Amino acid sequence: MPTNQYQICNEKKLEKAQAAFRKSGAGGMQVFADFDRTLTKVFKDGRECPSLISVLSRDNILDKEYAKEAEALYAQYRPAEISDALGYAEKSILMEEWWRKHYALLVRKRLNISDVRSAIASDIVELREGFFEFFNLLEQNSIPLVILSANGLGTISIRLFFERVGLPTENIHIVSNNLLWDDQGFLVGAEGPFIHSLNKKGIMIEKYPFYAAVKSRKNILLLGDTLEDADMAESFDEENLIRIGFLNKEVETQVKKYGKKYDALILHDGSFSFVNELLRGILGQGK
């Protein structure tokens, strides 16, 4: 598959925002990003990669009954998640219900933090080509990376993943589902309301401890792979947003919809090349 295909969807907006970002400099900027299928690849060796939580089933980390029950929940709720017939409010209720049932299942199956580590150890989940350069640019210029993720294994799994690939997390702030563990490392529950694929625009980062360190940074580079991800920074002014979308599949049928939500698109599970070029230009390190 191509690794560097991209498409500019809103050239005037992108140019204007870039100029504003350059004027404010690195100190006025932060990055909002989804995790699964945005920072990570969708395809590897011709196979579609699972999300971190799906590795539990794929690698039989828990028992076979878990995989069957998790698949049954997917079959029940996934059609509602992608339905055009249901409204946002109805969908959100169903997504919350889905997570509540799945976490109850994980508690029954005695999920342990060691199981999370086993899922992360799988080499099927892999960062996109060019992400390490992107990360280094952020770290060298003290630009915070705020990850807003509906990841089913929660904040701890993303942090452990970055540790596994050797990246420091001091400059990374993770907003994801908060799982609760006992003193032996077994899951005992999860704190709601849950973050799911449809409600990221309602996340109030003001309530998180890291907010004090990022609140003065008004320019947001937003990275996402779904139409809903484009609204992750809904409370920020439009002129302070650059939205980059990763359109990984069904490009021909989805490109118009994505083009209305994002300023530029990375196509066909592509690399971070365009994003890095954009960031270097903003930082005055471009050609």
Image: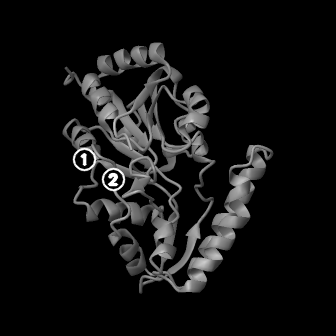
Secondary element at tag 2: loop
Left or right of 287? Residue 213 is right
Residue at image location 48% in from the left, 25% down from the top: 263
> Height in image: 282 above or below 78?
above
Q: Nearer the viewer, residue 56 or 201?
A: 56
> Height in image: 118 above or below 251?
below
> Height in image: 140 above or below 94?
above
Answer yes or no: do the residues labelled 2 and 1 have beta carbons within 8 Å?
A: yes
Residue 60: x %, y % from top left = 48, 81
Residue type at mark 2: give it: Leu
Tell me the residue that label 1 is attached to. 132
Tell me the residue that label 2 is attached to. 127
- In the picture, the quarter occupied by the C terminus is top left
* Res. 185 image quadrant: bottom left
Secondary element at tag 1: helix
**Dot label at residue 59:** none
Whole-number angstrom distance, CA of label 2 to CA of label 1: 8 Å
Residue type at mark 1: give it: Phe
Residue 225: x %, y % from top left = 50, 43
Label 2 neighbourhood size at 10 Å, few (<14), some (14-19), many (20+)?
many
Label 1 neighbourhood size at 10 Å, few (<14), some (14-19), many (20+)?
some
Residue 249: x %, y % from top left = 52, 45
Sequence-first disc among 2 and 1: 2
